[in-house]
């Protein structure tokens, strides 16, 4: 069973429906004990980094998520679920993240393009990973964001995307998978990625 974490921010039902459509069992929960018992974790999110961290702390979920990741449990972060893995964000002043991965979250500085970056865009595969099985290079995914991650360790960058600048659109390190785009809104390719994460969780041996 995969826990989709509900902290009041994010398109949870679309994520849930996406997994169910590809035959993966999920539950939407804000209970730290249920998250701890789950075989995999999905942290979606849309909105402000600071608000996300505040709500996760209020629900006593931060330590549970971080401990689960450190124990090797498969984790999929979507949008904010990617960004909070890093050391800090510059959104509305500096705010600390989980600091599991070293790096920061910065705002687009593209004079000739609209921010937020919204709509379909391509991913370029720099490092293959299990979630990219069946997904070709330059496949299109759906994005909605004004900020992006800048990892200190470039070896964790799995895909990049161009929007006035080349930015990290997916990272992979051990049991950590996280994407800036929204698989649940990305039709066939997005469903394939959710199916692949379900397979990773099935293969997980705690």
Image (tube, helix red, strand yellow):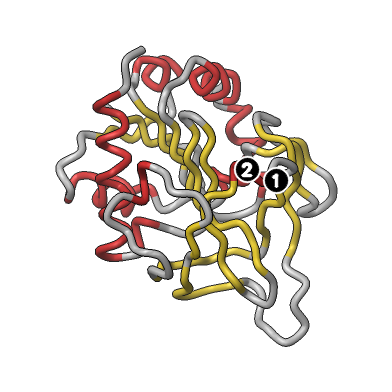
Please name the residue shown 49% across and 30% down the image.
174
The image position of residue 37, as x and y in percent, is 35, 15
- Quarter of the image containing the C terminus? top left
Q: State the image coordinates of residue 25 (x, y, percent, origin top left).
A: 20, 34
Q: Nearer the viewer, residue 45 or 105?
A: 105
- Image point 30% across, 50% down: which residue? 133
Where residue 60 sits: x, y (%)? Answer: 57, 21
State the residue lying farthest toward the right: 93
Vertical comparison of 137 with 152: above or below: below
Residue extending furthest toward the bottom: 112
Give above or below for 36 relative to 160. above
Find numbered disc 1 in the image and state the secondary structure of the residue it sits on.
strand
For label 2, the SS is: helix
For the N terminus, the quadrant is top left
Q: Is residue 116 left or right of residue 38?
A: right
Residue 197, how many percent across, how many down?
32, 40
The number of numbered badges drawn on the structure is 2
Residue at 26%, 51% in the rendered image: 18
Tag 2 residue: 155
Depth-wise, is mark 2 or mark 1 nearer the camera? 2
Residue at 36% of width from left, 45% of height from top? 131
| 2 and 1 marks in contact (CB < 8 Å) | no
In the displayed structure, 107 sits above or below 122; it is: above
Say the numbered circle drawn on residue 151.
1
Report which quarter residue 138 is drawn in. bottom left
What whole-number distance in Å separates the C-alpha atoms at marks 2 and 1? 9 Å
Q: Nearer the viewer, residue 160 or 24?
A: 160
- The front one of 3 and 195 is 195
The crowding category of the residue bearing disc 2, from other C-alpha atoms within 10 Å (few below 14, some 14 to 19, many at least 20), is few
């Amino acid at each position: 069973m995969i826990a989709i974490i509900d902290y009041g921010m994010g398109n949870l039902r679309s994520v849930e429906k996406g997994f169910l459509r590809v035959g993966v069992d999920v539950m939407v929960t804000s209970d730290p004990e249920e998250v701890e018992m789950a075989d995999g974790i999905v942290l979606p999110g849309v909105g402000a980094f600071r608000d996300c961290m505040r709500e996760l702390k209020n629900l006593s979920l931060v330590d549970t998520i971080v401990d689960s990741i450190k124990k090797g449990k498969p984790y999929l972060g979507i949008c904010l679920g990617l960004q909070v893995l890093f050391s800090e964000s510059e959104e509305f002043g500096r705010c600390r993240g989980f600091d599991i991965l070293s790096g920061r979250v910065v705002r687009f500085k593209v004079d000739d393009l609209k921010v937020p970056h919204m709509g379909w865009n391509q991913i370029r595969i720099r490092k293959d990973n299990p979630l990219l099985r069946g997904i070709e290079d330059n496949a299109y995914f759906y994005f909605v964001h004004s900020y992006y991650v800048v990892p200190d360790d470039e070896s964790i960058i799995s895909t990049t995307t161009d929007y006035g600048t080349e930015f990290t659109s997916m990272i992979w390190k051990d049991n950590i998978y996280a994407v800036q785009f929204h698989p649940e809104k990305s039709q066939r390719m997005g469903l394939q990625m959710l199916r692949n994460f379900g397979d990773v969780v099935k293969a997980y041996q705690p």
